[in-house]
Every structure is written in C-alpha cells, then in structure tokens.
Image (tube, grey):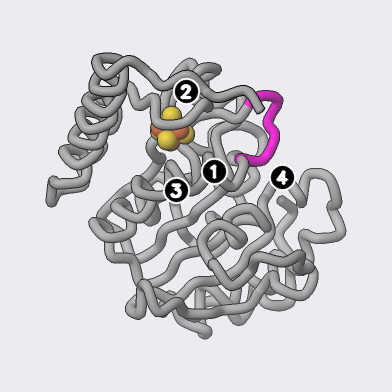
Amino acid sequence: MKKRARPEVSEEKDRLMQFDLFDEDVAEILSVDSYADFKKGLLASNCTRCPLHEGRTNLVPDRGNPKTDLVLIGEGPGANEDEAGKAFVGRAGQLLDKIFASIDIDTNQDCLIINVVKCRPPGNRAPTKEEAKTCSVFFEKQLELVQPKIVGLLGATALRHIDPRRKKSFSMAEEAGSFFRLPRWPEIEFMVLYHPAALLYDGKLKARMWEHIQLLAVRLGLGEANLEGRKRVQPSW
Ligand code: SF4
C-alpha cells in the first residue's frame, strides 16, 4: 500500500492556523447578543465554511422581523433569494405571504423567515447533511436570539435537519400539521408545515395547508373567534 506523504511541518502548521482563525471568525459572529449584530457579522464574514459559498451571489440571512414570536424555517435560498439577498421572495415566497396574510400575519412585520442553509444550493437541490450541519450554528444562533414561541418548519428538509430523531424517511402527509418540542429548545413549540413550493406543484395540498395555518393561528393566540368565518371558506391563494 502506498504510504501517504506526511505534510511538511510548516504546511501542517498553516492548515491548523487557518482552521483556528476560521473558527475564531465563527466564534466572533456567534458571540454577539443582538440580532442586528449577528446579521451584520454574518454578512460581513463572507462565510466559506461549506462548499455552498462557491455558487452564491448573496448570503441570505433572513427576511422579516426578529422581534417576533413566530419564526419560519425553510430549506435554502433559491435563485430569486440568492439575487435579492432575502429569504422567500420568489414564487413560493409570494404564496407564503398570501397564506399568512389570510390569518392576518404580515411576513415582513410579524414573523422572521430563515433557512437551514444561508447560501443557494446549486440547481436548487436540497442541502446535504454536511452542508446543513455546518451552517446549523447560524440558525441555532438565530433561534437563541429571537426566542420565538413557535417555529414553523416549512417542508421535509427543515424538519429533517432540525429534529435529529427524523433520520429515517418519513411522510409529510402524516407529519404536516403536527406540533412537537425538542429537549434542545424546551421553550419552543415546533409545527410541521408544507413548503409553499409543494403547494405550487400540487394544488390539492392547499386545503390541508389552510387547516394547518388555522391551527397555527389559534396556537399563536390570534383567537378562534377571529377565524370562525374563515374556517368554512378557503382563501383563493
Ligand atoms: S451555507 Fe452556511 S456554512 Fe455554507 S458557506 Fe453559506 S453561510 Fe457558510
């Protein structure tokens, strides 16, 4: 068997130094205690922790208001988001806005929308386990700073990467609309929701999304009474 050449001592030292400096950068981004500082630090970092940085135009931290009880987590930025540097601004994002407007939630004012990864995966593929794990320090910090009451997980990718118990395959038809808690964030209630892109492909899912979004409204304390009339009429989004 061919022996691997040992790196020169200076090469190895350089590699370790780069790693240390790199982690110091991340530690600095994560050391802040205000959301504005976190976002500023992340954008300024020009993060290269995972290969997704290679294809991005803009790093996409979020969209909306960090002073909120509701955070929505999607998969990763698409082409429109990469271009704009804002989460959920394409067709799926526009549908998401309409869905939440139907329970009187303005997605720019009343919630914060983030993604599992902050840079666009090529060809809009799902992020790999390694990419999601590497970027997870950032969404974890976002949850720590925002301290939401409810986190809506938009689609299977968000659910898979946030709940470590979902390693095996699962069915969104069974999971969507369910609530759960995680030991890691005991104060947060997580709700599984369809990704709006799924509704663009399969319009039949809209009726179920309407049921789920009404449940979410009640959980947020928006009041059942306010929703009485809407329970019978599905909006035309
Ligand atoms: S996806 Fe996350 S970890 Fe990867 S380069 Fe972008 S910000 Fe960094």
Q: Nearer the viewer, mark 3 or mark 2?
A: 2
Label 4 sits on a secondary structure element that is helix
Q: Which residue is mark 2?
A: 53
Label 2 sits on a secondary structure element that is helix
In the rendered image, the quadrant that contains the N terminus is top right
What type is the residue that disc 4 sits on?
Ala
Lateral position of residue 175 relative to residue 145, left or right: right
Residue at point 40% right, 79% down?
Answer: 183
Q: Which residue is mark 3?
A: 113
**Which contiguous range is marked in magenta?**
122-127
- Is the residue at mark 1 in contact range of ligand 1, meaning its CB lies under 8 Å from it? no
Question: Crowding near pointer 3: few (<14 within 10 Å), some, many (20+)?
Answer: many
Q: Position of residue 88 (x, y in %)?
A: 54, 38
Q: Earlier in the sequence, mark 3 or mark 1?
A: 3
Residue at point 52% right, 84% down?
Answer: 224
- Is the residue at mark 2 in contact range of ligand 1, meaning its CB lies under 8 Å from it? yes
From the viewer's perspective, is residue 182 above or below residue 210? Answer: below
From the viewer's perspective, is residue 102 above or below residue 178? Answer: above
Q: Nearer the viewer, mark 3 or mark 1?
A: 1
Q: Position of residue 203 (x, y in %)?
A: 84, 52
